[in-house]
């Protein structure tokens, strides 16, 4: 079955969820109201990292491996938060493999 989604629907869902590597499930996630964390904007617009709140141009953001909207699209994060999330995921996944 093929489900067609339009671009507007994908990017208008700004509900944030954060992936928990240990639980293998999403948890509700929210940022302070004063933060500007769009899913899509012009590259030179200054936005906040969806994880720590630091400001940077949208074009310098990384796609978060853990903070997504309801369709699974990642919000923008700074390099430090991206690397921290990736290393946490790799570490957690390796621990799961060791247990198996």
Image (cartoon, grey):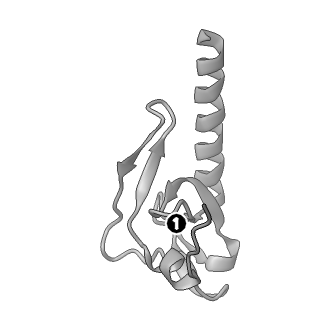
The spot of residue 37 in percent (x, y) is: 47, 74
The secondary element bearing badge 1 is classed as loop
Q: Which residue is mark 1?
A: 49
**Image position of 39 with respect to 69: above or below:** below
> Residue at 48% across / 46% down in the picture?
19
Decide which of 37, 7 is in the foreground and name it: 7
Mark 1 nearby-residue class (10 Å; few <14, some 14–19, many ≥20)? many
Q: How many marks?
A: 1
Q: Above or below — where is 64 with respect to 2? A: above
Percent position of residue 97, x then y: 65, 18
Residue 96: percent from the left, percent from the top?
59, 20
Dividing the picture into quadrants, the one containing residue 79 is: bottom right
Please name the residue shown 67% across and 85% down the image.
43
- Quick one: which residue is furthest to the top in this view? 99
Residue at 36% across, 64% down:
31
Report the residue at 47% width, 58% height from top: 52
Q: Is residue 54 left or right of residue 58?
A: left
For the view shown, which residue lies furthest in the left direction?
Answer: 33
Q: Quadrant of residue 41?
A: bottom right
Task: Give the vertical position of 34 relative to 89 (above or below).
Answer: below
Q: Which percent across, then down, holds residue 30?
A: 34, 61
Query: Based on the displayed image, in which of its 4 quarters is residue 58 positioned?
Result: bottom right
Above or below, comparing residue 94 to residue 72 in the picture: above
């Amino acid at each position: 079955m093929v489900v067609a989604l339009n671009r507007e629907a994908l990017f208008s869902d700004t509900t944030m969820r954060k992936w928990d590597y240990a639980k293998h499930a999403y948890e509700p996630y929210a940022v302070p109201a004063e933060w500007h964390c769009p899913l899509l904007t012009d590259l030179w617009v200054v936005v906040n990292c969806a994880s720590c709140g630091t400001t940077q141009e949208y074009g310098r953001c990384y796609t978060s491996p853990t903070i997504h909207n309801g369709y699974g699209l990642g919000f923008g994060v700074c390099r430090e938060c991206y690397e921290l999330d990736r290393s946490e995921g790799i570490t957690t996944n390796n621990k799961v493999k060791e247990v198996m």
